[in-house]
Amino acid sequence: MELYEIAYSEQSNRFIIPENAVKPQGLSLAIGFFDGVHLGHREVIRRAVSLGNDRGQTPAVLTFDPHPRVVLGKDQYHSVLTPMEHKLELFAENGVEESFIMSFDKAFSQVTAERFVRELLLPLGVRTVVIGFDFRFGHRGQGDAELLKQAGEGRIDVHVVEPVYRDGFKVSSSRIRELLSEGSSSEASGLLARPYEVRGEVVHGKALGRQLGFPTANISPAFSYFLPKHGVYAVTVTLEDDEEPAVYHGVINVGLRPTVDTGAVEPKLEVHLLDFNRDLYGRNLKVRFHDFLRPEMKFGSLDALIEQIGKDAEAARNRLALL
Ligand SMILES: Cc1cc2nc3c(=O)[nH]c(=O)nc-3n(C[C@H](O)[C@H](O)[C@H](O)COP(=O)(O)O)c2cc1C
Ligand SMILES: Nc1ncnc2c1ncn2[C@@H]1O[C@H](COP(=O)(O)OP(=O)(O)O)[C@@H](O)[C@H]1O
């Protein structure tokens, strides 16, 4: 998949479009923020890919970085379900051949919807656009499907994907956040069409884990992730830099470790891999959350904690055997 970065220059009052991004055969473009790349997003992307393939246009995605809410100051501590690097992988897996990352800053947020169409989409050679039912773009979100059609002057065929429902709920990034914060990780996986994933590097902890009989790799998240409800989960783990990445089974605790830490405010992610005994310091891990096993608790003694971790490991083993 090709990747292009697009910026809006406040100084010259125009979009900076890489020259090789413009393709004569035209683009079939899905536009959106796509946090989570969930079932609804996949439908938007799938439609752009299949229309592109039918029409001889290159299937492409245009997305924004960072999230508009962060730049516009509406959400200072915004956390994401899928950082850009992961989103791009999911786009490629779904048949996208070109991705455009529009750098979202204050200057771009002032650009009108008409100008976005005339000065970016048309010059890029966009012939087909697919958006979700609630997608808005341009200054103050004034752009919608109707405006896209008008500003495209008949040269852009616009498709709107209707909401996708699951179990009576509209699939959305906020529904997925809600499910994750309730510990409903397997329901969240259903909406994501994959288990929720967090990536990060293994850092040193208090070296207590080995003493307890359960070494735990402490993960420092590589991005500002939305974290699931504090508690214990059955997880699968891949070591990113392994030549032939194997999938390991494990059990993770996400939380403040009230038994061993007092007054911690930053949640920790600590994973114990089953049937595994290797040094992981400095390695990059991908952790996939399967079942929620139990909430985090404060134990009266380390022995009680150790006993419970043993049970958690067995529960994870049993759940993951069913995968
Ligand atoms: C499966 C699992 C479950 C855990 N559950 C809890 C818990 O309920 N309460 C708690 O205070 N700590 C819990 N912990 C965290 C342990 O207290 C922590 O991993 C241990 O103290 C090791 O610390 P270290 O990695 O800094 O050496 C859990 C850890 C694991 C691996
Ligand atoms: N089965 C395993 N699961 C997780 N980490 C393991 C495992 N076996 C060995 N390790 C290693 O042990 C480290 C964790 O040991 P621990 O005593 O909990 O120390 P700390 O939490 O201070 O890093 C991991 O970072 C990893 O390098």
Image (cartoon, rainbow, N blue to C red):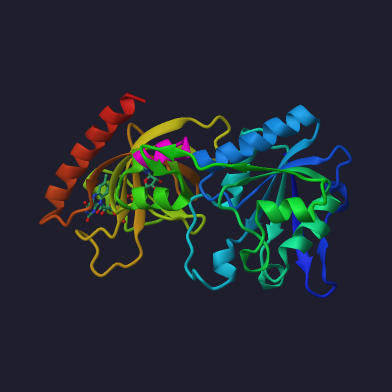
- Establish if 249 lies above or below 297: above
Q: Quadrant of residue 168?
A: top left
**Viewer can see residue 202:** no
- Establish if 304 lies above or below 68: above
Is residue 63 rendered to the left or right of residue 52? left
Is residue 140 rendered to the left or right of residue 224? right
Which image quadrant: the C terminus? top left
- Establish if 137 lies above or below 100: below
The extreme left residue here reads: 300
- Establish if 26 lies above or below 32: above
Q: Which residues are magenta?
A: 187-195
Q: Nearer the viewer, residue 303 or 10?
A: 10
The extreme bottom residue here reads: 11
> Percent position (x, y) of residue 260?
22, 60
Is residue 261 rendered to the left or right of residue 129? left
> Percent position (x, y) of residue 196?
43, 43
For residue 287: magenta?
no
The chief SS type of the magenta part is helix
Which image quadrant: the N terminus? top right
Q: Quadrant of residue 107?
A: bottom right
Q: Nearer the viewer, residue 241 or 66?
A: 66
The extreme top residue here reads: 322
Q: Residue at x 62, y 39 (%)?
A: 45
Q: Quadrant of residue 43?
A: top right
